[in-house]
Image (spheres, rainbow, N blue to C red):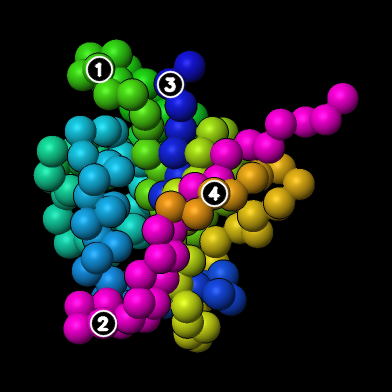
Amino acid sequence: MTPVLLIAAVASNGVIGRDNALLWRLKSDMAGFRAATLGKPVVMGRKTFESLGRPLPRRLNIVVTRHPGLSLAGAVVASGLDVALAVARAETLRSGATEIVVMGGAEIYAQAMAFADRLLITHVEAAPDGDTFFPLIDLSVWAGRDISAHPAGPVDDYAFRVVEYRRAARSA
Ligand SMILES: NC(=O)c1ccc[n+]([C@@H]2O[C@H](COP(=O)([O-])OP(=O)(O)OC[C@H]3O[C@@H](n4cnc5c(N)ncnc54)[C@H](OP(=O)(O)O)[C@@H]3O)[C@@H](O)[C@H]2O)c1
């Protein structure tokens, strides 16, 4: 099975967004997002797709919606997460991409956590008021490894660190 990556930027209080938008500008993190997703099929909820304003280029955009017949320019529409992952798998076979990326939002992360092989989480050093949250990362299930740390700066509203989580090996 093609591995599934969940990618998200999460505040220290678990917030990921408000009013269908992000709560920060982290240009350096966007470069990391681009590098982690380019050439791979990306699965997202309909609200996240709308928040982007346009499809992400050079990635098959797969959008999950309960509205049958919805047509979105530049995206493939899927009636459920299972359908979206099947479409994404077919795309990896076609393109040779090594991974499927699930890129939010909260509703989709909550459903996709069970299918994820890897989490790439940008931990943002802020605790803003928000209305959407990343699921709790259970550290008895997931083992984290620090990838990088960045200070706040002219193009980054807050300091952040990137952590990769993989499923922890179970002890016998
Ligand atoms: N910080 C980050 O890394 C990050 C990443 C992504 C998004 N976000 C933020 O997250 C927020 C959006 O998240 P959200 O939870 O409100 O929305 P979402 O997960 O992006 O989309 C929710 C929509 O997906 C569809 N959907 C969900 N589960 C489905 C299922 N099982 N079958 C069929 N369709 C399904 C429904 O679309 P229909 O209503 O069309 O049926 C639902 O309304 C925004 O604030 C965004 O900026 C943050």
Q: Residue 149: where, in percent of width, then height?
A: 40, 65
| Residue type of the residue flagged with mark 2 | Gly
Nearest to viewer (mark 2 / mark 1)? 2
| Residue type of the residue flagged with mark 1 | Gly
Q: Residue 67: where, in percent of width, then height?
A: 37, 46
**Is residue 82 visible to us here?**
yes
Q: Residue furthest right?
A: 172
Residue 146's label in the rendered image is none
How far apart, in angstroms, are the residues tagged by discs 3 and 2?
Answer: 37 Å
Q: Residue 12: where, in percent of width, then height?
A: 55, 75
- Left or right of residue 100: residue 117: right
Read off the magenta span.
148-172
Residue 96's label in the rendered image is 1
* Mark 4, residue position: 145
| Residue type of the residue flagged with mark 4 | Arg
Task: Assign a secondary structure to mark 1.
Answer: loop
Q: Residue at x 24, y 45 (%)?
A: 35
Task: Assign a secondary structure to mark 2.
Answer: loop
How far apart, in angstroms, are the residues tagged by discs 4 and 2?
Answer: 24 Å
Q: Residue at x 71, y 31 (%)?
A: 169
How far apart, in angstroms, are the residues tagged by discs 4 and 1?
Answer: 27 Å
**Label pair 3/2, CB-CB below 8 angstroms:** no
- Sequence-wise, the earlier of marks 2 and 1 is 1
Nearest to viewer (mark 3 / mark 2)? 2
* Mark 2, residue position: 153
**Label pair 4/2, CB-CB below 8 angstroms:** no
Residue placed most toward the observer, 158 or 90: 158
